[in-house]
Image (cartoon, rainbow, N blue to C red):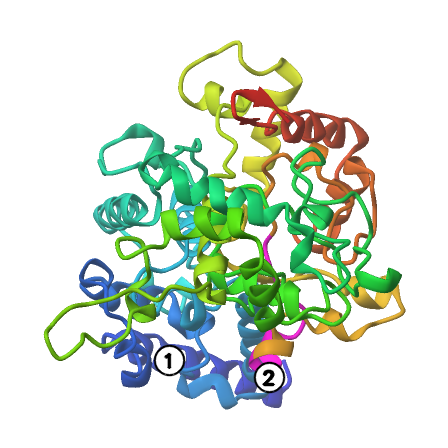
């Protein structure tokens, strides 16, 4: 054998012999800038586990081993980290102030359940990163505990339903003020919120049309076309933020936006308030809800010198948007066949739908479509395993997704994951309304999000499952 080859083999063996003990000598710790963001005590107690088993690949601040500078190792490690960050960025999803997203919990659970992480190619060099059975049980218990906080209507970590990433919807809107709900319902349907009195919230989010309008993009005042598909308003109360790019932090902020958008309703809230104030019937209804007992604390003036507190006597945009938001909190759709099946009603779903759920679960689709809404809890890259936008062509400004809000290049093409609830009655699909065909949407997601080329029979079963997600509103199936 050539002496150079022998020398090369010897050098490689020496590096491996040196690398193995050095790679496992010390426990890893999270970068302080990352660790300091974590405030939830249950998660904070587990940071050492994630530092040792996850962050080398799933964090921008992960450690780079000393052998990463070697020619072959450097390119391999960079490629692995880039792929890992496309699937799960722990810095953004897990190491956060407060509760991590339900999608983050689902992703952790999936790899714990199937034992796929850390991968063997990593643990061969970093054997102290392997996850023991005890560590797995501790993490799964933590996940169930965090789910009780993230999921309204669930408060027992031992509830067997919490062992899954997806949960039956629990309608908790019964605690809301009925008068405020009714006022918000009227405003939701009131065309006086638009500049020419032609459009209401319901124009683009019809409750008789799956909570949207069945259009690729909605039509605003003066027949202007919006740049993006209108998502369903049903179950939006579960969303981490509102709009595809998450620019509104809650339902009230979302309710305020379209009114002053020049290609949507094209009005001004000051003008809306003036117009509504001229309606004595509406003002009386409004004051019955937002009188001295009902005004938001930030809307109340400072107490008078004698200590009395007098509520304002006129309408305000804050109160109007609050009423709309409260109404939208009631737009939940429980009791779908899937929900009933999850709760033990074995004949609630067809055999094809059950098979479709098993495919959906096995392919890891429930890692993003998690929680009660089966989505809306995270921002994910459109095209994790393939370039969706290159294949589609004709890029637009809204295709930037979350990046348009954060101006962070890492958010390019990231969108809030849409809910799958009532997906069979809320077409077209995706932020660009690319297809009205549910089977086509399933095929696209398999290709660009999970790198799976689904067979026609599999797609048929997954569609049957998705059809089982149609729930009820006011006791009637959508």
**Does the image show residue 73?**
yes
Seen from the viewer's position, the closer of residues 12 and 64 is 64
> Can you give x and y, in whole percent of width and height, for residue 368 in the image?
53, 50
Magenta residues span 406-417
Image point (74%, 63%), residue name = 264
C-beta proximity under 8 Å, tags 1 and 2: no
Seen from the viewer's position, the closer of residues 212 and 70 is 212
Seen from the viewer's position, the closer of residues 2 and 120 is 120
Image point (75%, 44%), residue name = 213
Q: Which is more N-terminal, label 2 or label 1? A: 1
State the quadrant of the C terminus.
top right
Q: Residue 91: say if magenta.
A: no
Crowdedness near tag 1: few (<14), some (14–19) or many (≥20) residues, C-alpha within 10 Å: some
> Can you give x and y, in whole percent of width and height, for residue 451 in the image?
69, 52
Image point (38%, 64%), residue name = 313
Q: Quadrant of residue 359?
A: top right
Image point (82%, 48%), residue name = 215
- Mark 1 lies on a secondary structure that is helix
Which mark identifies residue 407? Answer: 2
Looking at the image, is mark 1 or mark 2 nearer the viewer? 2
Q: CA distance from mark 1 to mark 2?
A: 39 Å
- Mark 2 lies on a secondary structure that is loop
State the quadrant of the N terminus.
bottom right
Left or right of 119 on screen, residue 304:
left
């Amino acid at each position: 054998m050539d002496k150079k080859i022998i020398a090369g083999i010897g050098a490689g063996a020496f590096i491996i012999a040196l690398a193995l003990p050095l790679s496992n000598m010390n426990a890893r710790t999270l970068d302080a800038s990352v660790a300091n963001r974590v405030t939830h005590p249950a998660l904070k107690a587990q940071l050492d586990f994630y530092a040792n088993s996850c962050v080398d690949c799933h964090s921008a601040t992960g450690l780079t081993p000393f052998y990463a500078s070697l020619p072959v190792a450097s390119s391999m490690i960079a490629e692995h980290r880039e792929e890992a960050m496309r699937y799960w960025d722990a810095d953004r999803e897990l190491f956060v102030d407060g509760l991590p997203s339900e999608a983050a919990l689902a992703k952790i659970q999936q790899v714990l359940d199937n034992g796929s992480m850390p991968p063997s190619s990593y643990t061969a060099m970093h054997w102290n990163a392997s996850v023991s059975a005890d560590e797995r049980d501790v993490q799964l218990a933590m996940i169930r505990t965090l789910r009780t906080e993230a999921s309204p209507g669930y408060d027992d970590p031992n509830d067997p339903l919490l062992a899954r990433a997806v949960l039956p919807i629990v309608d908790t809107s019964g605690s809301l003020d009925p008068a405020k709900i009714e006022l918000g319902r009227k405003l939701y349907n009131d065309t006086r919120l638009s500049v020419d009195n032609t459009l209401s919230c319901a124009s683009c989010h019809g409750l008789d049309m799956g909570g949207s309008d069945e259009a690729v993009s909605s039509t605003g005042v003066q027949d202007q076309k919006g740049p993006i598909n209108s998502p369903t308003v049903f179950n939006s109360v579960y969303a981490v933020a509102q709009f595809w790019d998450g620019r509104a932090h809650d339902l009230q902020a979302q309710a305020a936006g379209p009114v002053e958008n020049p290609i949507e309703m094209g009005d001004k809230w000051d003008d809306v308030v003036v117009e509504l104030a001229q309606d004595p019937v509406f003002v009386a209804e409004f004051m019955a809800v937002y009188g001295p007992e009902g005004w938001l604390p930030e809307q109340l003036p400072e107490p008078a010198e004698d200590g009395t507190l007098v509520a304002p006597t006129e309408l305000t945009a804050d109160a109007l948007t609050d009423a709309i938001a409260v109404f939208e909190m009631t737009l939940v759709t429980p009791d779908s066949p899937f929900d009933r099946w999850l709760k033990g009603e074995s004949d609630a779903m067809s055999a094809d739908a059950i098979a479709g759920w098993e495919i959906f679960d096995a392919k890891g689709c429930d890692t993003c479509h998690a929680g009660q809404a089966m989505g809306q809890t995270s921002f994910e890259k459109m095209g994790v395993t393939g370039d969706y936008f290159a294949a589609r062509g004709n890029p637009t400004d809204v295709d930037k997704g979350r990046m348009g809000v954060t101006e962070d290049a890492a958010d390019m093409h990231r969108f809030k994951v849409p809910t799958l609830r009532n997906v069979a009655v809320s077409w077209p699909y995706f932020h660009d309304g690319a297809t009205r065909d549910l089977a086509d949407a399933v095929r696209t997601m398999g290709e660009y999000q999970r790198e799976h080329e689904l067979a026609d029979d599999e797609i048929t079963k997954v569609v049957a499952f998705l059809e089982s997600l149609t729930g009820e509103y006011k006791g009637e199936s959508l």
